[in-house]
Image (cartoon, rainbow, N blue to C red):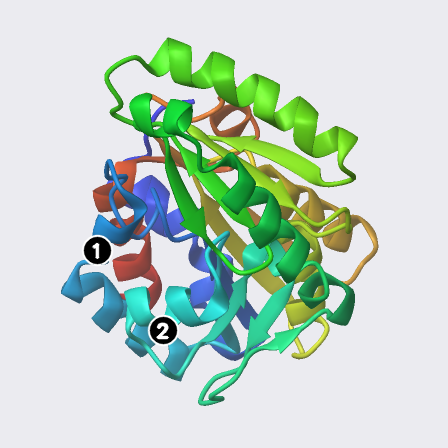
Amino acid sequence: MSVPSADALEQGLQRLTQDPPSAAIFCDIDGTLAPIVRRAEEAHVPEQISKLLGRLGRRYGLVACVSGRSAAEARRLVAVGSIAYAGSHGAELLEPGSRQPRLIPAFKSWEGPVRGFAADQDTPELRRLRIRIEDKGSIAAFHWRGVPDEDAARTRLERLAQEAERGGFATHWGRRVLEIRPPIAIDKGQAVRDLSSRADLRSALFGGDDATDLDAFDALEALAAEGELDHVVRVGVKSDEAPAGIVERADLVVDGVRGFERVLEVLADG
């Protein structure tokens, strides 16, 4: 699918811009609002994107960032307090203006075991391979982007994933990251469903760039099929690392963070 022209982009978003109070804007963060960087802690949402999200939050029925990061970290990164954040792939919900996120209790109960497993894996071998361990509460992320030997790191993490699964944990592979998670059904699609049920919506958009965002695409399709939404727009943020499904299943395809920023501009000004 080709990247839309300015006119095609405005036309593709017209159903949302015509009736903002009954429309929802959902978006991923890393790779969508913030450029992908070597280390997760170096990610940065450009100030102009944060300002656009603040404008959208005042205009649309619902605006939410749906991220694999914790909800608190997602809000810190985006720096907009007036919108919602679904963190940890939907296990946490931080309402606009709230200080503490609401967590699925069963998810929280796995924080100790996940951290214990991650600590046990912090071995000289992983350090030699330069694999970085990110503590995300009840999720541990093992990053190998930019290490000296990415193939060797991936091979080692494949063995680690098998060990985690034997220990009763769930695993998920992302873009040069392996996540060790509680064995609880969580995904961005469920987050989209939960958030949508809290507002009187007739249309919704989700923008994302990674495999986990396909669950949100699924949720929008299902909500439309069930008659809960009249119109949905799936925006695929294209990059060299984006899975094929992001482009193949999108209604609109844009180039990288700058392309999605243009989507936000049309939504804000339309």
Which circle marks residue 44 in the picture?
1
Q: Earlier in the sequence, mark 2 or mark 1?
A: 1
Report the residue marked by disc 2: 56
Can you give x and y, in whole percent of width and height, for residue 190 in the image?
71, 56
On-image quarter of the C terminus: bottom left
The mark tally for this picture is 2
Mark 2 is surrounded, within 10 Å at the Cα level, by few (under 14), some (14 to 19) or many (20 or more) other residues, namely many
Q: Is residue 218 above or below residue 138?
A: above
Residue at the extreme left: 47
Q: Amino acid at mark 2?
A: Leu
Left or right? Give the position of 82 relative to 173.
left
Confirm whether residue 217 shows in the render: no
Can you give x and y, in whole percent of width and height, for residue 159 in the image?
60, 18
Left or right? Give the position of 56 relative to 250.
left
Q: Residue at x 68, y 67 (%)?
A: 108
Can you give x and y, in whole percent of width and height, for residue 202 in the image?
65, 67
Q: Secondary structure at mark 2?
A: helix
Q: Is residue 264 above or below residue 132?
A: below
Q: Residue at x 49, y 17 (%)?
A: 156
Spatial CA span between label 2 and label 1: 20 Å
Closer to us: 145 or 256: 145
Q: Is residue 165 above or below residue 186?
A: above
Can you give x and y, in whole percent of width and height, for residue 116 in the image?
59, 50
- In the figure, residue 180 lies in which quadrant? top right
